Amino acid sequence: MNDTLTSGSPRPGDTYVQSFARGLSVIRSFSAEAPSQTLSEVAQRTGLTRAGARRILLTLEGLGYVEMQGRQFRLTPKILDLGFAYLSSLPLWNLAEPVMEALVADVKESCSAAVLEGSDIVYVLRVPTHKIMSINLGLGSRLPAYCTSMGRVLLADLPADEVRDRLNATERRALTARTVTDLSALQEIVAQVRQRGWCLVNQELEEGLVSLAAPIRDRSGRVIAAMNISGQANRTPAPQMIEQFLPKLLAAAQRIGQLLQMKA
């Protein structure tokens, strides 16, 4: 295999540093499913040659972002510095965390915040209570926007044609018997979320999981993040979640927006 970018990557130009892009692809090849990899596995996952993958891994090792144990490579905790640089560069997350903690203490359910990247949501804050999902979610975890409450809230702030394009670019799989995958139906749902100002997803991402999300807006009214409350359907059915938790969630999201405006 040639030491080239994987298919679908941007075409290199005068402002495109290919070696840097390859380094990022090596970092992203590590995940919860592949926390430790051999050189061959990294090369296979990234589409690089063994020689190319080796150069990048040894560079990352020299910088302290990767460690090698025998034939296995793994990321080190120093890699968190890259994500922390993003989190610490925006006042939103420091302001949001105490509000989310107070909400969790009140409703006794988990609360998360996420931003939209492409057709996925990326978790940037999480205040858990019980383990309610089989998926292990942490900061930086990604989930598809089409079947998540926060994803639909974030999509709802985009123009309709962009919503269509992002949904079209997504592999829309039925994760449960309730998952909506039809493009037209999803566009209609996002339009309803746009009009309503909040979103409930009932067991579309995972059986038994109910999630309620609201937007966090900046002073111009633009949605810059979404936050949700997640619970188990057998403990807090969807109608009960809307009745008991929606006003508190909307108030918390509004409060974060107000704090952000005061900080600006």
Image (cartoon, rainbow, N blue to C red):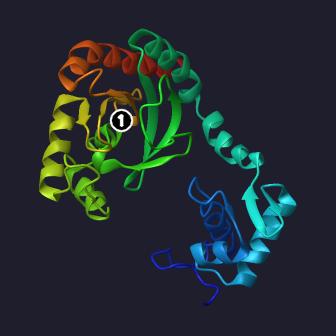
Looking at the figure, which quarter contains the N terminus? bottom right
Residue at 64% x, 64% y is 24
Q: Is residue 173 left or right of residue 137?
A: left
Q: Residue furthest bottom?
A: 1
Residue at 36% x, 35% y is 222
Q: Residues within 10 Å of mark 1 (few under 14, many from 20)?
A: few
- Residue 244 lies in quadrant: top left
Residue toward you, 92 or 32: 32
Residue toward you, 221 or 115: 115
Q: Which residue is mark 1?
A: 222
Q: Is residue 17 visible?
A: no
Q: Does 251 sit above or below residue 227?
A: above
- Residue 16 lies in quadrant: bottom right
Q: Residue furthest front?
A: 234
- Residue 89 lies in quadrant: top right
Find numbered disc 1 in the image and state the secondary structure of the residue it sits on: loop
In percent of width and height, residue 12 lies at: 57, 79
What residue type is disc 1 on?
Answer: Arg
Residue at 20% x, 43% y is 190
Q: How many marks?
A: 1
In percent of width and height, residue 117 lies at: 44, 51
Q: Is residue 101 visible?
A: yes
Q: Is residue 85 left or right of residue 58?
A: left
Q: Is residue 231 left or right of residue 18?
A: left
Residue toward you, 176 or 126: 176
In percent of width and height, residue 264 lies at: 53, 24
Q: Does 157 sit above or below residue 13?
A: above
In percent of width and height, residue 140 lies at: 55, 45
Residue toward you, 154 or 145: 145
Q: Is residue 135 left or right of residue 78?
A: left
